[in-house]
Image (cartoon, helix red, strand yellow):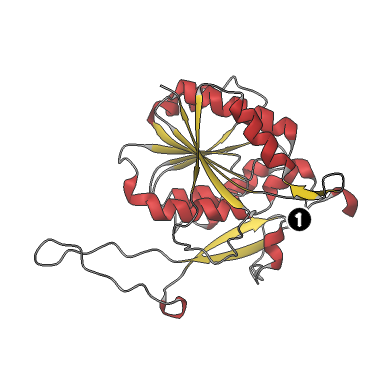
């Protein structure tokens, strides 16, 4: 695989995430991402929530998640890397964890190396899915095993290919209990985007009470003819969703607290999709 045909996540240049821990697969690396978990609010003698001082970074206690991954891949195997959208979704999960229904499950599409799914499993049972290519599912399970201390709820790994909407029996059995569907950084190729939107639409019809949350980073290109920049993959994604009259779209603010240590760039966006009733 030549360098001209490979892509690499920008996050590797942000900080010293890569550790000297030994990967299970030759050519991979193991990165450590630190995050803090907010304290559970306490009640005072009158039954009111106590006012808590927000600690400074130096005063916070951090937890670590170990993720084995590639540092560069071909475009069709970018799921073997870590991208910023996964960290944004992880922050959102931690921030909203107390709102999740007690008897619900979380389904992640395109789980990749599993960072978001592992964080989700701290709060609710999780079904993580991806294509069965390039060893992605094996690496996903490897990272789950690496972080057993963090996993508090059941977590299962299933194959799901956006280009195949005939979902397997095991996934169909789990869908009635799913209330949240997650996807991070799955918008980078127009053919995959079309297939992803069709998959999202099919899942919402099968489980109409679900909310779908999609996190991604807008990647801009400069158009010489327009003397301006635009994000083609992102714009195409929005066009695909707009063609689905039964899907309700809502762009969410990304001003919720940041618990992971990474650069939350302004290009990161988070969308919520539901089925029109």
- In this orientation, does residue 1 appear? no
Picture quadrant where residue 26 is located: bottom right
Picture quadrant where residue 100 is located: top left
Q: Position of residue 256 (x, y in %)?
A: 44, 57
Q: Between 227 and 56, which is closer to the camera in this rendering?
A: 227
Furthest toward the bottom, the residue is 58
SS at mark 1 in the image: loop
| Residue displayed at 42% across by 31% down | 210
Residue marked by disc 1: 8
Furthest toward the left, the residue is 46
- From the viewer's perspective, is residue 205 above or below residue 155? above
Q: Between 70 and 217, which is closer to the camera in this rendering?
A: 217
Q: Position of residue 38 (x, y in %)?
A: 36, 64
Q: Position of residue 117 (x, y in %)?
A: 51, 47
Q: Quadrant of the C terminus?
A: top left
Q: Position of residue 215 (x, y in %)?
A: 57, 46
In the visual, does 77 lie left or right of 181? right
| Residue displayed at 74% across by 34% down | 190
Picture quadrant where residue 10 is located: bottom right
| Residue displayed at 51% across by 50% down | 89
């Amino acid at each position: 695989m030549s360098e001209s045909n490979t892509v690499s996540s920008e996050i590797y240049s942000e900080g010293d995430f890569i550790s000297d821990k030994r990967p299970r697969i030759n050519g991979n690396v193991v990165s450590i991402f630190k995050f803090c978990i907010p304290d559970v609010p306490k009640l005072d003698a009158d039954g009111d929530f106590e006012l808590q001082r927000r600690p400074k970074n130096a005063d916070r206690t951090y937890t670590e998640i170990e993720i084995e991954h590639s540092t560069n891949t071909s475009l069709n195997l970018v799921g073997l890397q870590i991208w910023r959208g996964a960290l944004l979704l992880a922050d959102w999960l931690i921030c909203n964890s107390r709102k999740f229904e007690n008897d619900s499950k979380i389904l992640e599409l395109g789980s990749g190396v599993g960072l978001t799914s592992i964080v989700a499993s701290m709060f609710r049972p999780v079904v993580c899915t991806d294509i069965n290519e390039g060893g992605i599912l094996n690496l996903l399970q490897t990272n789950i095993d690496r972080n057993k201390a963090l996993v508090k709820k059941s977590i299962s790994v299933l194959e799901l290919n956006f280009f195949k909407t005939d979902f397997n029996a095991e996934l169909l059995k789990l869908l009635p209990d799913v209330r949240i569907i997650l996807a991070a950084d799955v918008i980078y190729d127009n053919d995959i985007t079309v297939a992803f939107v069709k998959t999202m639409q099919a899942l919402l019809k099968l489980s109409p009470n679900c909310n779908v949350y999609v996190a991604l980073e807008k990647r801009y290109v400069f158009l010489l003819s327009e003397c301006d920049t635009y994000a083609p993959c992102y714009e195409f994604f929005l066009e695909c969703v707009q063609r689905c009259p039964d899907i309700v779209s809502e762009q969410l603010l990304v001003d919720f607290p940041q618990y992971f240590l990474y650069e939350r760039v302004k290009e990161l966006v988070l969308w919520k999709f539901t089925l029109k009733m």
